[in-house]
Image (cartoon, rainbow, N blue to C red):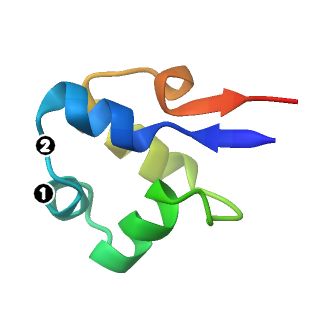
């Protein structure tokens, strides 16, 4: 199972999900889907933009758990 740790990174960077969504260029609704782990997929371009804005690596956001 892939776990999304986006909330944790947002807290560390003191940024709201709405602010990140605006900077990345996705809707608040899509950001919410990502944060809650309900997304079935994520585009590499979106992941890249999130990592750029949060100054992190994809592994800081995505985690594999059995």
Left or right for 63, reference 35: right
In which quadrant of the rendered view does residue 12 lie?
top left
Q: Which of 11 and 42 is in front in this view?
A: 11
Query: Farthest residue in the right direction?
Result: 66
44 is higher (above) or lower (below) than 65: below
Quadrant of the rendering where the N terminus is positioned: top right
Which residue is the site of mark 1?
A: 19
- Tell me if residue 37 comes above or below residue 13 in the rendering: below
Query: Where's the C terminus, which quadrant?
Result: top right
| Depicted 39 relative to depicted 8: above or below | below
Q: Please tell me whether mark 2 sits on a helix, a strand or a loop.
A: loop
SS of the residue at dot 1? helix
**Residue 25 visible at all:** yes
Q: Nearer the viewer, residue 24 or 40?
A: 40
* Residue ID at (59%, 56%): 37
Vertical relation: 40 (above or below) 43: below
Residue 6: image x %, image y %?
41, 41
Per the rendering, the mark at residue 15 is 2
Q: Decide: marks 1, 2 in contact (CB < 8 A)?
A: yes
Q: Percent x, y for residue 2?
A: 73, 40
**Label for residue 64?**
none
């Amino acid at each position: 199972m892939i776990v999304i740790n986006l909330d944790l990174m947002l807290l560390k960077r003191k940024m709201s999900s709405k602010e990140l969504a605006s900077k990345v260029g996705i809707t608040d609704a899509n950001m919410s889907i990502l944060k809650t782990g309900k997304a079935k997929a994520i585009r590499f371009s979106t992941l890249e933009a999130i990592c750029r804005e949060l100054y992190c690596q994809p592994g800081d956001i995505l985690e594999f758990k059995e």
